[in-house]
């Protein structure tokens, strides 16, 4: 029997045609979306442009073509872990079984704010770090046992199929990578989870009513660049922490660093500097950069580790928001999620968490009863949900303007955090999207 969600909950889509949900992109957002759609549609198809990497004996995690950040360690914030729990119960047990353990964001982390080191006390804020490859493998393993979900690799989506008026998306044009021409794949719902390289804005402009479907875009440059490298450290040589983070300070020329434990005794290290400053490209320069940060914990850890990858440079760290929520002609049968809508500077580690929260919201919309909700409403609520991580990453409002708030109190909290576990945990709660920044007003400093 066709799931009732198609008839009653996608208002404006019209009667169900084939019980099919199509997801563009097989990254974190696309795989999570498949977990959300499974059981709510008769069939779910993920269209991934490239192939997933094969298992190898390489000392560094394999990277996936088309995803530059796949070569860098990934941090899932506590709110993201909670969203993963809702979408794929048991994912964390699978992650742990494959070698990546959870850790307390305060007790198991060494964190230096500009005012000093935070106290290492239990916070109950549980997070995870691992390679991108491992996380995608776990999400794919959860889909492998669902017969109605199909992953199609090496598939390139060429555009949208729509009704004659362009007010409803009815599928996609898709081709194998090497094919010149595409075929039509019909669907009741198309989910764009193709990431930062999404061409959805152009596709919308090509619809019959495309003149009314041109989305505004806000870009906030981070002014930062970074390099990363994978290391291996014997378990007996590992420090008594799983995360080390050194915030930028004027004394270190606004340079910063992070080191996180991943799976199989691998550690990922990220070094950051303002755009235009030189970044290390060899092992010696890498260690010189670390020495210039003015602290010894990271140097001591790296002295017991050996690099197992080349040093990888990333220059694109801008924040981008596509304002689909403002469109008056958003077509039925289409949603956009994750980096296709909101791309955040990777330094803050908020991207996967923002994406997962958006997919939980989508699942809620699909499950709504009593007439359901429209897809334009989803895009509007998704924009509101993305506002919190956007402000944390940019310090700006959604339109790119400066927020009208007094930051003096927040600055005082950051100054007080090294001597107060309560304040430190509250600030970490905000960073992990567990509480709104406005709740920090309760602390008198």
Image: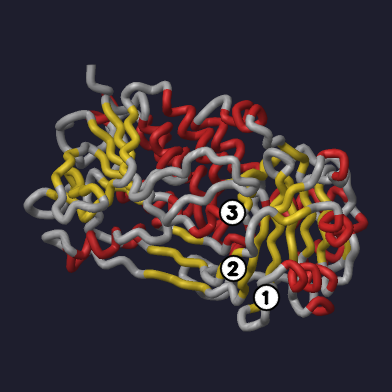
The numbered dot on residue 350 is 3
C-alpha separation, residue under disc 1 versus residue under disc 3: 24 Å
Q: Is residue 23 depicted above or below 292 in this figure?
A: above
Q: Residues within 10 Å of mark 3 (few under 14, many from 20)?
A: many
Residue annotated with mark 1: 279
Which circle's residue, 2 or 1, is located before the other in the chain?
A: 1
Q: Is residue 308 left or right of residue 80?
A: right
Given residues 259 and 210, the one toward you in this image is 259
Circles 2 and 1: CB atoms closer than 8 Å: yes
Q: Quadrant of residue 150?
A: top left
Between marks 1 and 3 in the image, the one whose residue lies nearer the viewer: 1
Which circle's residue, 1 or 3, is located before the other in the chain?
A: 1
Between marks 2 and 3 in the image, the one whose residue lies nearer the viewer: 2
Given residues 354 and 60, the one toward you in this image is 60
Q: Position of residue 295 (x, y in %)?
A: 89, 66
C-alpha separation, residue under disc 2 versus residue under disc 3: 20 Å
Circle 3: element type: loop
Residue at (54%, 48%) from the top-left corner? 62
The quadrant in which the N terminus is found is top left
C-alpha separation, residue under disc 2 versus residue under disc 1: 8 Å
Residue at (15%, 32%) from the top-left corner? 17
Which circle's residue, 2 or 3, is located before the other in the chain?
A: 2
Check the image and name the residue furthest to the left.
164
Q: Position of residue 120 (x, y in %)?
A: 88, 47
Q: Is residue 118 left or right of residue 133?
A: right
Circle 2: element type: strand
Q: Is residue 274 depicted above or below 349 in this figure?
A: below
The numbered dot on residue 313 is 2
Q: Is residue 361 depicted above or below 445 in this figure?
A: above
């Amino acid at each position: 029997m066709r799931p009732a969600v198609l008839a009653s909950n996608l208002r404006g889509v019209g009667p169900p045609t084939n019980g099919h949900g199509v997801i563009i992109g097989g990254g974190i957002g696309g795989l999570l979306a498949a977990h959300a759609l499974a059981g709510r549609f008769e069939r779910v198809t993920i269209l991934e442009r490239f192939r997933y990497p094969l298992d190898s004996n390489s000392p560094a995690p394999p990277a996936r073509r088309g995803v530059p950040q796949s070569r860098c360690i990934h941090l899932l914030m506590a709110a993201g872990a909670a969203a993963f729990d809702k979408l794929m119960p048991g994912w964390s047990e699978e992650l742990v079984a494959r070698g990546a353990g959870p850790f307390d964001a305060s007790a198991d982390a060494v964190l230096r704010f500009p005012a000093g080191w935070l106290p290492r006390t239990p916070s109950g804020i549980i997070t995870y770090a691992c390679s991108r490859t491992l996380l995608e493998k776990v999400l794919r393993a959860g889909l492998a046992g669902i017969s109605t979900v199909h992953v199609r690799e090496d598939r390139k989506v060429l555009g949208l199929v729509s009704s004659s008026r362009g007010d409803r998306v009815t599928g996609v044009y898709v081709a194998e990578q090497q094919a010149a021409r595409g075929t039509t794949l019909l669907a009741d719902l198309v989910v764009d989870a193709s990431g930062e390289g999404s061409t959805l804005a152009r596709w919308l402009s090509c619809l019959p009513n495309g003149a009314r479907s041109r989305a505004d875009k806000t870009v906030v440059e981070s002014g930062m660049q970074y390099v990363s490298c994978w290391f291996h450290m014997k378990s007996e040589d590992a420090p008594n922490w799983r995360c080390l983070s050194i915030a930028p300070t004027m004394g270190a020329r606004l340079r910063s660093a992070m080191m996180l434990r991943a799976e199989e005794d691998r550690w990922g290290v990220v070094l950051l500097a303002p755009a235009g400053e030189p970044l290390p490209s060899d092992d010696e320069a890498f260690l010189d950069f670390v020495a210039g940060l003015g602290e010894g914990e990271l140097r001591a850890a790296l002295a017991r580790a050996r690099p197992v990858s080349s040093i990888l440079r990333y220059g694109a760290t801008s924040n981008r928001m596509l304002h689909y929520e403002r469109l008056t002609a958003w077509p039925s049968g289409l949603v956009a999620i994750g980096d296709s809508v909101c791309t955040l500077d990777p330094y803050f580690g908020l991207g996967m968490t923002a994406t997962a929260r958006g997919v939980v919201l989508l699942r809620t919309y699909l499950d709504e009863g009593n007439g359901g909700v429209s897809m334009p409403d989803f895009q509007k609520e998704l924009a509101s949900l993305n506002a919190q991580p956007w402000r944390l990453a940019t310090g700006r409002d959604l339109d790119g303007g400066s927020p009208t708030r007094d930051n003096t109190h927040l600055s005082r909290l950051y100054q007080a955090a090294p001597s107060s576990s309560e304040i430190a945990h509250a600030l970490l709660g905000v960073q992990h999207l567990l509480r709104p920044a406005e709740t920090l007003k309760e602390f008198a400093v």
